Image: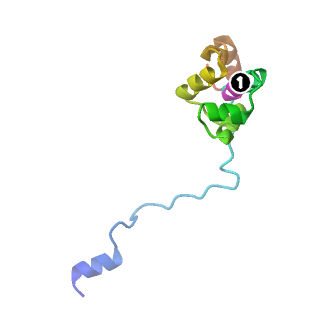
Amino acid sequence: MPIYLYAMATNPPFSPVGKRPRPTPAKGGGRRVQLPLLAIVGGRVKTIRQERGLSQDDLAVGIPMDRSHLSMIEAGKAAITVMTLYKLAFALDCEVTELLPKLADARALLRAHGRGK
């Protein structure tokens, strides 16, 4: 057998030589964790949406966004982008600042959960 065929047979191209396989996640590793600031923003979105008499479907169609993603935002289990925050504020006919916590409240909340200084 020529040397190059032997080398290819013993060490095929694109093989993960020297790399360890990735560990498989434990059961429940895909669960979403509720973060305190996300919970506040999501709660405010939900409160204002209910005050306006809108369902999640109505709001999701108006943005546009998947209703399940909106539900996760309201539950505080999905992060929200700045663009989505503005879309929500526009659709809910409110200011973006109404959806965000005050700075002092955010600091106190982060200190209580050990994530801030």
Residue 94: x and y, percent?
A: 65, 16
Verify whether residue 26 appears in magenta. Answer: no
Residue 10 visible? The answer is yes
Question: Chief secondary structure of the magenta span?
Answer: helix
**Where does label 1 land, which residue?**
40
Residue 76 visible? The answer is no
Please, is residue 15 above or below residue 45 in the view? below
Residue 33: x and y, percent?
A: 69, 39
Indicate the quadrant where residue 70 lies.
top right
What amino acid does circle 1 point to?
Ile
Q: Is 2 in front, or is 63?
A: 63
Total marks shown come to 1
Image quarter of the N terminus: bottom left
Q: Is 73 in front, or is 10?
A: 73
Please, is residue 117 above or below residue 18 in the view? above
Q: Which residues are magenta?
A: 38-42
Residue 28: x and y, percent?
A: 70, 52
- For the point 66% across and 55% down, which residue is it? 26
The scheme the figure's colours follow is rainbow
